[in-house]
Image (spheres, grey):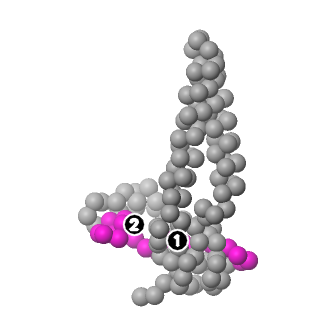
Amino acid sequence: MLETRAIVVQSDAGSAEVIGSGSSGCSACEGRGCGSRKVAQLFCSKPRQFRVDNRIHAGVGDEVIVCMPDGALLRGVGLVYLLPLVFMFSGALLAGQSDARAAMGALFGLLIGFLLAKWLSARSFRQQPYIARLARE
């Protein structure tokens, strides 16, 4: 299970907006060994807010632990990257022999893949990150 520290900035019925308060990188070196902290600082200059399920009814200003279910990250990557890619290649192969038809088939397949990924991701409620507990020092 993936866990990270966050601070609640807004809370409403059943969900909350959180900002990650932990450092970038894994818990082994927290970004000091492999340089992942520098890469994160390069591409993520400002903190990002995320909407998560608020199962413990944490309030604004609480430091919490946000969890993501096992396998949710891998399934998300499969939906966002692999599914549209498979549909793109399938569309190109099924469209025909000419380059123009293959290109149009690839674009159509890519569009269908993205729409299907969006629809499937909206239906997977159990894959949402959630607030598991209050953080303790």
Q: Position of residue 31 (x, y in %)?
A: 32, 65
Reply above or below: 96 against 126.
Answer: above
Determine whether, in the image, residue 24 is placed left or right of residue 112: left
Question: Quick one: label 1, few (<14), some, or many (20+) residues within 10 Å?
Answer: some
Q: Amino acid at mark 2?
A: Ser
Residue 47's place in the image compared with 74, above or below, is below
Relative to 78, does residue 88 appear above or below in the rendering? above
Q: How many marks?
A: 2
Task: Report if residue 83 lies within the magenta region.
Answer: no
Labels 1 & 2 near each other (Cβ < 8 A): no
Question: Given the current orientation, which residue lies at the most extreme left position?
Answer: 33
Can you give x and y, in whole percent of width and height, for residue 127 in the image? 60, 61
Do we see residue 61 in this rendering? Answer: yes
Expressed as whole percent of the image width and height from the top left, the position of residue 84 reads 58, 38
Residue depicted at 64% across the width and 41% down the height: 114
Q: Name the mark on residue 24.
A: 2
- Quadrant housing the C terminus: bottom left
| In this rendering, the label closer to the viewer, 1 or 2 | 1
Magenta span covers which residues? 12-31
Residue at image point 34% right, 60% down: 36
Q: Residue furthest top?
A: 98
Q: Secondary structure at mark 2?
A: loop
Per the picture, the main secondary structure of the magenta-coloured stretch is loop
Residue 100 appears in the figure: no
Q: Residue at x 53, y 73 (%)?
A: 66
Q: Position of residue 97 (x, y in %)?
A: 58, 12
Q: Which mark is residue 67?
A: 1
Q: Label 1: state its secondary structure.
A: strand
Q: Residue at x 66, y 35 (%)?
A: 111
